[in-house]
């Protein structure tokens, strides 16, 4: 149950399912903890994508339960213990498949938009 | 990994908390670094994170095996709720235990007897081969020369082997004991694919005349006589006076045939006269089919082979075909069908039990209306409530199933004890497969009887449910009434089946076996090996019988080589002196070598002529008695007395002529139901046997003793008399003639007993069901009854109304049941020889069972009805 009122104006609401893809993409760069994932996505998208932090963790747990992510407790640079997520083999395949699917979708949509123009 | 997280829930929770905490603190630190005050940073981080508890709950749903947790929680809740009503729970579990237990027991029998493969290598390829007499139309054993021809000429079999049962007197090492065993050909053990525990099977050369006698012994003998010493190999073992060398020991529990066998010796080195005689049919053949060859193909080939044998030996073999049957079918016969029938019957019992428990659940759910209404109102989905109720019923059925396994264990030993003749009964046990079956039916049954009440409860009108509190919505009554009808119908079906079989068994008992079975004891006994000459054997038996006759309480006694109901001793004969042209045309008769007083002891009536006499001896002319069937068949239009018949194989002498001196009544030798075609019968005196035939009877004869005393009272005296006569031989197979008779009808008795037990259980359960439903509907109608009585209805009106309600249900149930029972009766009739002397649609049985059910139904209604009729209208009106 998304709560749209929490999204600031000008930020894009993430499409259903795209959060998973983004998490996988970010985790593919190396082991990373939940807070850093949020930061990284915002950084890369130049704050255009706002992740509702409350929905990040259920997504992480779901991806781990499906076997696409694996987790490990490690010490951070700041000297604290945190749970780091990294991509599994099947996770890599999943990311590849989802990325391809996303590109296909984007291409199709832009094709439609351009034609209509 | 995943499993670990399930088992250590607290650790998992701690880690999740730590992860969330880390996230929030990192965020706060960042904001503080950006210049916010600590309080502002905290509240902003919290706000941006959103609902912490909701996030946690969503994470928990992602925990591996979370569904298992939900399930366990539901089970715990169900157990708690069941514990709260111990009376209901106990009644339901007991009912289910009866139903599931009975099913488990019958399935265990079916599994052990029919489904378990024979304990040999590739048992499905093993077949039994016998000859088939085309002229007279029945299968028969074959001669050893026939077998050797088969072995040489046939190609359908990987291996073919021969065996014939043989009894031995084991005298050394250890004490004297009668042991049963087989003469087998060298390929016997390899054909079955049995690996010996010790030593080897027989060599081909050992299977010929002239070779040193070798024996393979059972694990039991090895244990008892050789103390499990491997040095037993090569040691001698004395069997019926001959020393055999032990060459092999069988694995423990090596089963062959339906009786324990302890000794195996080669068949080929037996008496060479008998073994070379094509008219001596005492061999049964076993073979292993070549892979992919079917029984029909083998049958076709063997018919051709047999035809060649017949043409080469026209004097002995014409008119003979072959008969091939899979070994398993030969061993278990049509028991499989009977067991399927019983499994069906016991399934019906379970159906009744389910209906009862479903009824109980209806009553229970009525009192829980409010609970469900509250749960539904609080947002539980209907699916969730249904799931909860189903879990409760499955929990009940699992508990019932566990108790049922215990009941089944007792039931099984009762079954095996009641019908020791059940083939392969050593395999009957509650094993993993049977337990799996029990588990499956428990779960299925739990869902089955839980579903209906659960669906009803979950679809109720919420508002009415909340308001009404303890009272039920309508509609339950009709469903419950339907369940009672089903119970009555099913009980009627079982009761009818049971009654038909009961009357069949009763009719069988009424069949005159041709002798008086009451007060007759039979047992087997032999003479010690030191009695060597034929004349000494004759004298010794005569003295033995004399001593037994002197025992107070013994009215008559004598020896015989053949007793009714205990296997056959058939041989050929012909009228006059001229032998018929072919073997197949030679009639066969059951032969009874007996002492002169045997017929008197058995009370077999003399119809014409005289009985055998003590003066009929080896020195006088051979005389025989024939039965009425032989007289009628072969002397249809003349007096048989003083006519001659020829008996081939009279010891070494062949074809002796015997004079008929008497005609006696026919005896049902093979059982009472006429399933085996009656054969003519010939009696001759044991004391007239030629010298070379007498030693055959030294190891064992059967004694029949007529006495009004019980077996336990007379046997000690008989044993004393036998040992005083100088015999060191054991007395075994002590049975009364009535036991033999009752065993001969086990195929009818076995389903009869079980079907009636099931019918009684069904009737009892149906009775409880009717009682419960009527009582319950009474309890709900107390107010209505109060009004009726206040308006002038008297006690009798109330009684009539309530019983009328029960009778209406019962009548419909009986109508449905009668039609279903007619179908069952047809099924029973389709089994050969299951029904005897009774029509499948026997009106008396049908009227009788309907009457029993109606009476039961009325009685079950009467108790609650009387209670209702005694109500004080004032109290009734104020109730609720």
Image (cartoon, grey):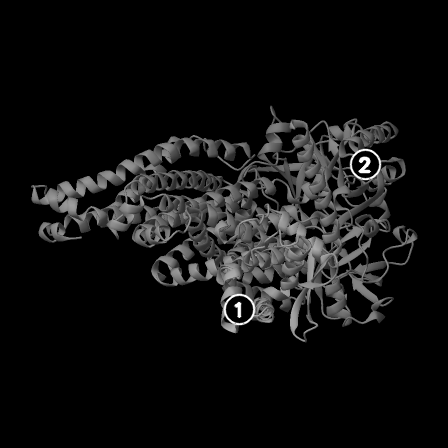
Q: Are marks 2 and 1 in contact (CB under 8 Å)?
A: no
Give the residue drawn at x 15%, y 43%.
B798
Residue marked by disc 1: B41
Question: Farthest residue in the top direction?
Answer: B637
Mark 2, mark 1: which one is toward the viewer? 1
On the question of residue B746 being in view, the answer is: yes
- Above or below for A97 versus B305: below
Residue B525 position in % (x across, y down): 65, 59
Res. B157 image quadrant:
top right
Subunit of label 1: B
The reply to the same-chain question for discs 2 and 1 is: yes
Q: Is residue B270 left or right of residue B849?
A: right
Give the residue drawn at x 65%, y 73%.
A81
Give the residue drawn at x 58%, y 39%.
B337
Q: Is residue B684 left or right of residue B577?
A: left
Q: Answer few, some or many: residues within 10 Å of disc 1's Cα (few below 14, many 20 plus, some between 14 and 19).
A: many
């Amino acid at each position: 149950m998304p709560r749209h009122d929490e999204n600031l104006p000008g930020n894009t609401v993430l499409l259903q399912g795209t959060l998973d893809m983004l998490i996988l993409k970010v985790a593919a760069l190396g082991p990373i903890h939940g807070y850093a994932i949020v930061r990284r996505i915002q950084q890369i998208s130049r704050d255009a994508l706002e992740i509702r932090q409350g929905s990040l963790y259920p997504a992480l747990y779901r991806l781990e339960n499906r076997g696409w992510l694996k987790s490990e407790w490690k010490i951070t640079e700041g000297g604290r213990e945190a749970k780091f997520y990294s991509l599994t083999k099947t996770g890599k395949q999943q990311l590849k498949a989802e990325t391809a699917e996303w590109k296909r979708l984007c291409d199709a949509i832009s094709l439609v938009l351009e034609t209509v123009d | 990994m995943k499993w670990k997280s399930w088992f250590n829930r607290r650790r998992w929770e701690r880690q999740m908390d730590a992860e969330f905490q880390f996230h929030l603190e990192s965020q706060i630190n960042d904001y503080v670094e950006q210049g916010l005050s600590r309080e502002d940073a905290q509240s902003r981080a919290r706000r941006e994170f959103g609902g912490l508890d909701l996030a946690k709950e969503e994470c928990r749903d992602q925990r591996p095996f979370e569904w298992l947790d939900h399930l366990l929680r539901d089970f715990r809740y169900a157990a708690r709720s069941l514990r709260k009503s111990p009376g209901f729970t106990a009644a339901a579990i007991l009912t289910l235990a009866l139903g599931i237990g009975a099913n488990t027991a019958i399935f265990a029998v079916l599994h052990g007897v029919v489904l378990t493969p024979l304990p040999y290598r590739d048992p499905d390829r093993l077949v039994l081969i016998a000859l088939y007499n085309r002229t007279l139309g029945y299968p028969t054993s074959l001669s050893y020369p026939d077998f050797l021809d088969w072995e040489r000429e046939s190609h359908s079999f990987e291996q073919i082997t021969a065996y014939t049962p043989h009894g031995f007197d084991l005298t050394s090492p250890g004490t004297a004991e009668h042991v049963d065993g087989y003469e087998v050909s060298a390929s016997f053990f390899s054909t079955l694919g049995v690996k010996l525990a010790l030593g080897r099977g027989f060599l081909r050369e050992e299977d010929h005349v002239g070779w040193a006698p070798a024996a393979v012994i059972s694990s039991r003998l090895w244990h008892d006589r050789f103390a499990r010493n491997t040095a037993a190999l090569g040691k001698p073992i004395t069997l019926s006076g001959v020393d055999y060398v032990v060459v092999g020991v069988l694995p423990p529990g090596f089963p062959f045939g339906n009786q324990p066998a302890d000794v195996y010796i080669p068949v080929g080195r037996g008496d060479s006269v008998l073994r070379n005689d094509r008219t001596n049919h005492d061999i049964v053949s076993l073979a292993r089919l070549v892979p992919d060859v079917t029984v029909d193909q083998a049958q076709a080939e063997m018919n051709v082979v047999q035809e060649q044998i017949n043409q080469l030996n026209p004097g002995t073999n014409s008119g003979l075909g072959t008969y091939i049957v899979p070994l398993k079918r030969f061993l278990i016969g049509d028991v499989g069908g009977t067991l399927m029938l019983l499994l069906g019957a016991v399934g019906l019992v379970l159906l009744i039990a389910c209906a009862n428990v479903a009824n109980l659940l209806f009553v229970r759910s009525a009192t829980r209306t409010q609970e469900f209404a509250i749960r539904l109102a609080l947002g539980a989905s209907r699916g969730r409530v249904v799931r909860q109720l189903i879990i409760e019923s499955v929990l009940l059925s699992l508990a019932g199933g566990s108790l049922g396994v215990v009941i089944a264990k007792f039931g099984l030993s009762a079954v095996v004890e009641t019908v020791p003749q059940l083939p392969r009964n050593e395999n009957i046990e509650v094993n993993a497969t049977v337990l799996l079956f029990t588990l499956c039916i428990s779960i299925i049954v739990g869902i089955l009887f839980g579903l209906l009440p659960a669906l009803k409860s979950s679809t109720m009108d919420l508002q009415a449910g909340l308001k009404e509190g303890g009272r039920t919505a309508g509609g339950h009554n009709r469903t419950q009434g339907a369940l009672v009808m089903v119970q009555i119908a099913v009980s009627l079906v079982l009761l009818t089946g049971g009654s038909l079989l009961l009357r069949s068994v009763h009719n069988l008992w009424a069949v005159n076996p041709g002798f008086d079975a009451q007060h007759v004891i039979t047992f087997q006994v032999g003479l010690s090996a030191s009695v060597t000459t034929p004349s000494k054997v004759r004298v010794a038996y005569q003295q033995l019988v004399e001593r037994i006759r002197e025992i107070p309480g013994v009215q008559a006694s004598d020896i015989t080589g053949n007793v009714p109901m205990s296997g056959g001793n058939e041989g050929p004969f012909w009228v006059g002196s001229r032998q018929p042209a072919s073997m197949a045309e030679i009639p066969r008769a059951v032969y009874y070598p007996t002492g002169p007083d045997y017929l008197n002891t058995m009370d077999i009536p003399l119809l014409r002529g005289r009985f055998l006499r003590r003066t009929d001896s080896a020195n006088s002319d051979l005389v025989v008695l024939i039965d009425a069937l032989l007289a009628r068949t072969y002397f249809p239009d003349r007096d048989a007395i003083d006519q001659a018949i020829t008996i081939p194989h009279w010891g070494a002498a062949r074809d002796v002529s015997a004079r008929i001196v008497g005609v006696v009544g026919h005896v049902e030798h093979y059982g009472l139901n006429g399933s085996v075609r009656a054969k003519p019968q010939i009696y001759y005196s044991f004391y007239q046997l030629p010298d070379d035939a007498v030693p055959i009877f030294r190891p064992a004869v059967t004694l029949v003793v007529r006495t009004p005393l019980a077996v336990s009272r007379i046997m000690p005296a008989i044993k004393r008399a036998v040992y005083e006569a100088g015999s060191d031989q054991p007395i075994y197979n002590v049975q009364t003639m009535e036991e033999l008779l009752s065993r001969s009808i086990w195929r009818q008795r076995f389903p009869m007993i079980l079907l009636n037990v099931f019918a009684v259980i069904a009737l009892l359960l149906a009775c409880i069901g009717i009682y419960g439903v009527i009582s319950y509907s009474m309890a709900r109608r107390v107010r209505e009854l109060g009004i009726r009585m206040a308006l002038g209805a008297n006690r009798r009106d109330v009684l009539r109304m309530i019983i009328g309600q029960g009778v209406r249900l019962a009548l419909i149930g009986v109508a449905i049941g009668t039609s279903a029972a007619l179908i069952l009766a047809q099924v029973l009739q389709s089994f050969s020889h299951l029904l005897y002397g009774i029509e499948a649609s026997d009106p008396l049985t049908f009227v009788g069972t309907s009457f029993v059910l109606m009476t039961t139904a009325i009685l079950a209604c009467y108790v609650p009805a009387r209670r209702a009729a005694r109500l004080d209208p004032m109290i009734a009106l104020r109730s609720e």
